[in-house]
Image (tube, coloured by chain):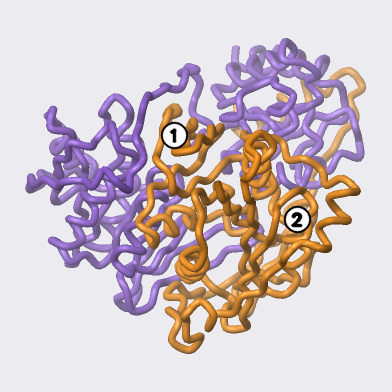
Amino acid sequence: MKIIVLVKQVPDTEEERKLDLGSGVLDRGASERIIDEVNERALEVALLYKDSNKGTEVVALSMGPESVIQSLRKALSMGADSAMHVRDNALAGSDVSRTAAVLAAALRNTRFDLVVAGNESTDGRGGVVPAMIAEHLGLPHLTYLNSTEISDTGVSGVRAGEDGTLSVHAALPAVISVTERVAEARFPNFKGIMTAKKKLLEVISLSQLGFDPALARMSSSVVVSTSERPARTAGKTIVDEGTAGVELAEYLAAGHLI
Amino acid sequence: MSNILVLIELSNTGETRNTAPELLAVARRLGTPVAVVATSPVGSAGLAAKLGSYGAAQVYLVESAGVGTLLVAPQLEALAAAVEALDPAAVLVANSVEGRDVAARLSVRTGAGLIIDAVDLRSEGGRVLATHSVFGGAYTVESTVVGVLPIVTVRQGAIQDRAEAVTPSVTETSVSVQAANAAVIDAVIPAVASGRPALRGAATVVSGGRGLGSKADFILVEQLADVLGAAVGASRAAVDAGFVPQSSQVGQTGTTVSPQLYVALGISGAIQHRAGMQTAKTIVAINKDADAPIFDVADFGVVGDVFTVVPQLIEAIQALRQ
């Protein structure tokens, strides 16, 4: 079994995240960049299978600038066997369509049984790339899984939905995405951190994937304008001295909120 | 006017989901709204009239044997057939789990451009312009698609207006679905109805956090919610502690809400929580920690114990109403 886990580097949600007001794209320098938490959980799903099934190979795959190496090293230190990094200056500012096309091309270049992704990133929150990759590759997709079970021949799980959940399955090869309800991610241990340095981290350019950077499908979605909302300011804060509940009720009544 | 296709999602019981009226209303602004529905061979009596009442000028019913048993594939094939037949200027779907999956696969198949999570749409100079609310409302971004068909996922609950009812023309057709590259639905587990308003789109939301201390004491949040006719929300800390199911989570990885009134009880207001509620019109917070960041965004903050302030608040609201 070979499982490929998709990894995205995102700005840390613990900090203020910024957009570049000119281009509308993420200001990558404005905050700490980390591996998206839901991707660590996706990796955990793969590693749990590997723990109980000898001979399983887990590969972390990411696309992005040079800084993405830090996130891939983290994945290797958690237990991934190797990593693939699609890196090319021509990919800066890619939209979801181009991202999915490039990741699908990288997947076509290698053998795999299962692709595991996070359901949506904390920055773009698009939630479409896994299903787009499945369509590129002509594979079934099982997205937004709150739980998963992997076997030699198939994958099943419980899919989140708007008015309930669905119990679903598909044969391998397949593409799945998991939500933050799946397994809690493990922490890298000392041995993991030391061996991560020796593991293969392959850097792949667009031309190696058969894309002519100039002819690669350009992003068709375009940002027209970007504006920043004025920061919300604090209003009135009182310390309860026995009547705060009454004062709050009066405040709500004055605003016609009750 | 150009056709604007709207994918109509059906619930587990075959009813149109509540996103149908808002999607058809926004489609009406852009052109001729065409409702596309994947239906099972069992039938779809009354569906066309209902969609007409939401403003669909045309109802495009696509029968498929896979409805209810194959994941996403019947809806995808139905919409692909409609795109082929009707030469639309745009395709709109809800930014739901199913809607995003359909939009994703359809965009790859047709070479269309994707616009994700629009909170508003307008037509300008023949282009569809979408408004997005990014990073919990910290930024407003406008985007468009150049040169190809735009497929837009629209945030659920974001469109307030409704289209006038019309009598639609009805087209019935059918598609076959390739089962080989689709996942199979084995069982449907319906959500438990709470009797309270749904979190998404609620006018008032009362949320509780770790400060409630236990699942048993979280009932205080529900009591205030019921007095205010509000939906119940929670911080991720309260969800992780098992006080409430994940469906109640407000924030970065939960539901984004934008109510008239948001009441935060025992919630510290981590940046991830604020990303899900900071566009509320009025924010009220009660927390015993005077340094809690929730007070930085609150219009009215109370530094105090939720277990004394909230019961007094409930009593005072009831007294004011008499």
Residue A162 - label: 1
* Amino acid marked by disc 1: Glu
Could you tell me if the residues under marks 1 and 2 are in contact, i.e. CB atoms within 8 Å? no
Q: Nearer the viewer, residue B304 or B197?
A: B197
Q: Is mark 1 on a helix, strand or loop?
A: loop
Which residue occupies 44% across, 38% down? A154
Q: Which of A207 and A9 is in front in this view?
A: A207
Q: Nearer the viewer, residue B251 or A218?
A: A218
Q: Mark 1 lies on which chain?
A: A
Which residue occupies 63% across, 45% down? A55
* Amino acid marked by disc 2: Leu
Categorize mark 2 by other alpha carbons within 10 Å: few (<14), some (14-19), many (20+).
many
Q: What element carries label 2?
A: helix
Q: In the image, which is nearer the foreground, mark 1 or mark 2? A: 2
Q: Position of residue B232 (x, y in %)?
A: 60, 25
Q: Chain B is drawn in which colour?
A: purple
Instruction: Answer with the quarter of the image where residue A236 lies.
Output: top right
Q: Position of residue A165 (x, y in %)?
A: 45, 28
Residue located beneath label 2 in the image:
A76
Residue B142 in view? no
Q: Position of residue A134 (x, y in %)?
A: 41, 55
Which residue occupies 24% across, 59% down? B4
Instruction: Answer with the quarter of the image where residue A54 lies.
Output: top right
The orange-tinted chain is A
